Image: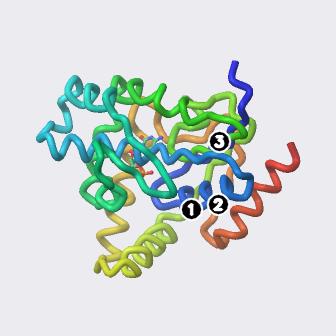
Amino acid sequence: MNEVPVIAIDGPTASGKGTVAQRVAAALGWHYLDSGALYRLVALRALQAGVAADDVAALTRLARSLRPQFDAGRVCLDGRDVTDEIRREDVGALASRIAVHPPLRAALLDLQRGFRCPPGLVADGRDMATVVFPDAGLKVFLTASVEARAGRRHKQLSEKGFPSNIAILLQDLRARDERDSSRSAAPLRPAKDARQLDSSDLSIEQVVAQILRWHGER
Ligand code: C5P
C-alpha cells in the first residue's frame, strides 16, 4: 500500500481545478499532477502522427510510450517544450474524444500513479478520486456553472491575445461536459466520499482556502 497522501481534485472543463490544484500543492509543498495534460499529450502525438480518433490500438501504443517531463510548470515531450501547444482548443477537443477509450485510459494509469511521491500529491482531473487514487485522503469535486466557466475561459483567452466567442465557448463546454459525463469508461462524476464545492461565486483564493481547511481538519 502507498502511504503517500493524495488530495484528488476532479471537475468539469474550466472549473478552475488546475489553478486551484497547483496552488494547494504549492501551499503544502507537495507534488502536482495535471492528468488532463497526459490526455492532451496523447492527442498532440496523434495529431502529429496522423492517428485517427477511433484507432484505439494505435492511440494506446502512443499512450504507453509517453515519457513526458514536467518541470517548473513546463512540459516537454520527445525533447520539445509543448506546454503551449497542448493548450490549443483542437488538442483539448481531441483529448476529450480519445479519452473515451478504456485501453488508452488503462495505459496511462501507471504513469499517473508514478507521480505519488513524498511528501504528497495533489492530482487534478476527472477520475482522480474514482479510479486513479481511490484511497485519496481528501476528494474534492469542483464545479461551476457552465456560464461562469465560459466567462473564465473567455477572459483567459483574451488575456493571451486570442479572440473568442462566448456562444461558441458555451457550446464547446457543454459538448465536452456531455462527453466526459456520459462515457462508460471513468465518467466524470463525484466519488461517493467526495466533498463538492461550487466555485461559481468564489475567488480562486477562497476555493484554495476551503480545500486547505478541509485538509487541515483531517
Ligand atoms: O482537464 P483538461 O481539459 O486538460 O483535459 C482534457 C481532456 O482529457 C478532458 O476533456 C477529458 O476528456 C480528458 N481527461 C480525462 N480524465 C482525466 C483528465 C482529463 O478523461 N483524468
Residue 5's quadrant in the figure? top right
Q: Position of residue 26 (x, y in %)?
A: 67, 57
> Horizontal and vertical percent for residue 164?
30, 77
Q: What is the number of the mark on residue 86?
A: none
Depth order, front residue of 16/42? 42
The residue where tag 3 is placed is 121
In depth, the one of 4 and 55 nearer the eye is 4
* Placement of 121 over or under 170, stated as above or below: above
| Mark-to-mark CA distance, 2 and 3 | 12 Å
The residue at the point 60 percent across, 57 percent down is: 22
Q: Tell whether 78 sits left or right of 54.
A: right
| Coloring basis for residues | rainbow
Label number found at residue 23: 2
Q: Position of residue 118 (x, y in %)?
A: 69, 36
Q: Secondary structure at mark 3?
A: strand
Separation of disc 3 and disc 1 at Cα?
15 Å
| Quadrant of the rendering where the C terminus is positioned | top right
Q: Amino acid at mark 2?
A: Arg
| Residue indicated by mark 1 | 19
**Residue drawn at (67%, 71%) of the image:** 202
Residue for point 53% across, 60% down: 15
Closer to the chain start, of discs 2 and 3, is 2
Q: Is 126 in front, or is 116? A: 116
Instruction: Pick whichever, 133 or 29, lies toward us.
Output: 29
Q: CA distance from mark 1 to mark 2?
A: 6 Å
Label 1: how many residues lie within 10 Å, few (<14), some (14-19) or many (20+)?
some
Could you tell me which secondary element the residue under label 2 belongs to?
helix
- Do the residues bearing badges 2 and 3 touch, measured as CB atoms within 8 Å? no
Q: Is residue 31 above or below residue 201?
A: above
Relative placement, left or right, of 30 versus 66 is: right
